[in-house]
Amino acid sequence: MVSLLFAQASHSLGLNDVCDALQLHSGPLSTIRGATAPSRNGLSHANKTRPAEMAEKLFWGVLEHLGTIAPSFRKGKSWGRLHRFKCAIYAMDSTVIELVANCLDWAQHRRRKAAAKCHLRLNLQSLLPQCVIIDTAGEHDNTRARELCAPVKSGEIVIFDKGYLDFKHLRALSERGVFWVSRAKDNMVYDLLDRRALPKGGKILADEEIMTRDGLHGRRIVALVEVDGQEREMIFLTNNFKWSAQTVVDLYQCRWEIEVFFKQIKQTLQLADFLGHSANAVRWQVWMALLVYVLLRFLAWQSKWGHSLVRLFTLTRAILWRKIDLAGLLHGYGTASGSFRFLGQPEQAYFAGF
């Protein structure tokens, strides 16, 4: 686990990279419960044989522990369009992680491609994962929708793209008292029950009550949404009949945060070069990447870090082997205390010697 966490924090490119770097820093490494640098064959064997369920249990255990010692970190806070809601709001989506096709037959996705897929339910208030499923990319998204939404409680809100549309599942969510917001497919067949009054001068084009052929009673909203500087017509679905149409549109736009989450972990952490080719090794590395993300989020919350996750990661990587109070450093480092500008000093106004 220490080796894989180091591989994430240092962006190691392979097994030799990890083992050599840990061997060169064997002194500081030994202070972590007497840890020793692994051999290349030993680390490769562990990646293949040690069950990835250990990494999964560790991730959820750490997340629960951090939530126990800091409840406000786990709960998060409402922001932007979400400020009017007091209940938990989740976004659900998946991302494809490209792999090496000629080495990973188990993850063959297309003729010359291999990929794994990470299905995730993200809490939009805390930006922390609540449910994660790591599998091959060959499965359609809606086959995992029931597992992702199983722990969602009555009164909570789930937002997802039309890839997760399954009318039987949506009807089951409605019966459980779970509110959901999604987009409609172009070929959706339904019966029109009623047309609602539209706000004047707005961008809501239609607000209708419908019934699908599968017996789902829902609400269909057509609105103009700005995308890349241009307005596009989009169709939304929900099972809530009390919200305004604009609230439904605003909720769906908050789903973009899960796209930002996937972008952050792919660009910041090590999910491009894998240390093993087996399914077990890939799952270990993905779970360790998610664990590093949660730890960085906790550091940012603890030190009131005011900048991006990328800058926090690069700073942490730069002082990885130094014995230093990281929380204290982040709290007073650069502009992290709240100002987003570097303040000039008097000595910068002249050249030394003149």
Image (cartoon, rainbow, N blue to C red):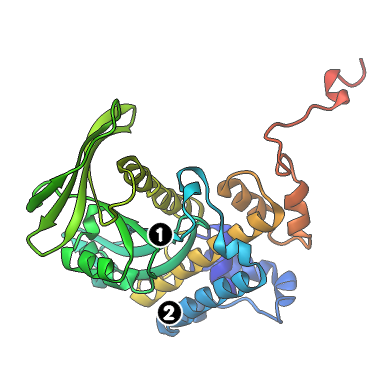
Q: Is residue 215 left or right of residue 12?
A: left
Q: Is residue 134 left or right of residue 83?
A: left
Residue 109 vertical placement versus 248 (above, below)? below
**Viewer-proximal residue among 264 and 84:** 84
Q: Is residue 348 left or right of residue 341?
A: right
In primary-sequence order, the first of circles 2 and 1 is 2
**Viewer-proximal residue among 5 and 75:** 75
In the image, which disc is placed on residue 90? 1
- Residue bearing mark 2: 52
**SS state under label 1:** strand
Amino acid type at image mark 2: Ala
Write down the quadrant of residue 74 in the picture: bottom right
Residue 83, percent from left and from top: 50, 47
Residue at the location (62% across, 76% down)? 37
Q: Are marks 2 and 1 in contact (CB under 8 Å)?
A: no
Does the image show residue 36?
A: yes
